Amino acid sequence: MIKLALIGCGKWGKNYLKTVNAIDGCELKWACDLDYEKLNQAAAVYPQTRFTENKADILNDSEVQGVIIATTPESHYMLAKEAISKGKAVLVEKPVTINRKDSHDLIELATAQNTVLMAGHTLIYHPAVKRIKGLLEEKHIIDDLCYLNMSRTSSTSQAPNVDVLYDLAVHDIYLSRHLIGMDPIWVIAHGERYIQSTYNNVINILLGFPNGKIASIFASFINTEKTRKITLVASKTKLVFDDTQTADRKIKIFNKVEQEHFLAMEDNSEPLTQECIHFMECIREHNEPLSGKENIEFVAKIIDCISKSLAKGGEKINIF
Ligand SMILES: NC(=O)c1ccc[n+]([C@@H]2O[C@H](COP(=O)([O-])OP(=O)(O)OC[C@H]3O[C@@H](n4cnc5c(N)ncnc54)[C@H](O)[C@@H]3O)[C@@H](O)[C@H]2O)c1
């Protein structure tokens, strides 16, 4: 039995409460939040978990092997640092940290402590993404890939108090590299703060990969609708992944040989369930997670390069 704890029981943290409590071979021993009201509400639903406002209850409990951090982004660094220092495996929600140096520090600390550090890059664990990745490899589709077009938008009446780069576009940064299987070599980014926002609420990013392959990422908090769409265009095959559709209509294939069709999915489980199971397995086997240290370092580097391009009015930044 793997014993875990959760820090942060807000909108997304609630999903961890539900998901971890439903996984066999795992006990969510503790959950922590600074908001007493949220703890009270959750305690009524999950009597098997102990709820606390004091993170020390978790950090000093030697039975707790792994800590999941789903708090607001600015608090991730300190909480993760404390948990790693206590020798705990840590799963930190995206964005792991809000600057590159802090991510690097956490990686160094986790390496020194020989403990698991994993990012909540949930979509890497999405069964549909696994299915697409398998297909791309099996049919060598990436060899003649032209571009990926990625759209991730919401229609919130009030944009959240966070940069759209960290909140939405970050998913497409790690996904583009995961699907293409190469590192980007340059980036161009343009952001806007519409409707009196303090943060960018709309962003366009172009990531250039070797051999002219491109990922173009559009993310917005102020769209007319929610989109979660990736269009992949290669010379012989085209594919659309629309995550707003039902499981049987998420992946659509177009090619010259077969008629356009939806790709069947054998696994319809939730990406967050797969992510949590992966975290548990990495703790048990002491494996490096798919969204582990190297992946965290990569995302921090790309966000840093995007920030440089944004600051220089969309200048092309080479990525080393
Ligand atoms: N992987 C995904 O697909 C996905 C989706 C949504 C949100 N997220 C991420 O999850 C995280 C949380 O987002 P949210 O929407 O739940 O935010 P939220 O504001 O609803 O919840 C954050 C919670 O953390 C608590 N908190 C803040 N600082 C704390 C501290 N030091 N100790 C204990 N509790 C503390 C707050 O009281 C609040 O309840 C963010 O990093 C967000 O980017 C990830």
Image (spheres, rainbow, N blue to C red):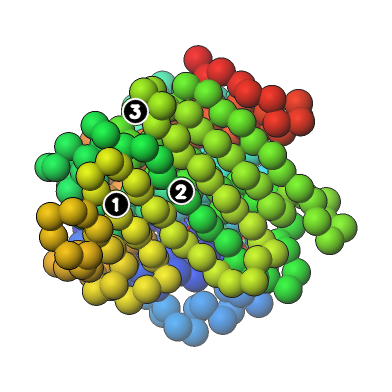
Q: According to the image, label 3 marks what residue? A: 182
- Which percent across, then down, holds residue 70? 53, 56
Picture quarter containing residue 139?
Answer: top left
How many C-alpha atoms fall within 10 Å of the one at disc 2: few (<14), some, or many (≥20)?
some
Which of the image's four quarters has the N terminus?
bottom left
Mark 2 element type: strand
Mark 1 element type: strand
Look at the picture and state if 261 lies above or below 164.
below
- Which percent across, then down, holds residue 200? 74, 48
Instruction: Confirm if mark 1 falls within 8 A of ligand 1.
Output: no
How many C-alpha atoms fall within 10 Å of the one at disc 1: few (<14), some, or many (≥20)?
some
Decide which of tag 2 and tag 3 comes sooner along the chain. Answer: 2
Three-letter code, disc 3: Met
User: What residue lies at 56% left-to-right and 81% top-to-bottom?
Assistant: 41
User: What residue lies at 87% left-to-right and 58% top-to-bottom?
Assistant: 196
Left or right for 310, reference 175: right
Decide which of tag 1 and tag 2 comes sooner along the chain. Answer: 2
Q: According to the image, label 2 marks what residue? A: 149
Q: Residue furthest top?
A: 320
Whether residues under marks 1 and 3 lie with C-beta atoms below 8 angstroms apart, the answer is no
User: What residue lies at 76% left-to-right and 26% top-to-bottom?
Assistant: 312
Three-letter code, disc 1: Lys
Left or right for 38, reference 179: right
Ligand 1 is found in the corner quadrant, namely: bottom right
Three-letter code, disc 2: Asn
Left or right for 238, reference 266: right
- Which percent across, then down, holds residue 235? 27, 41
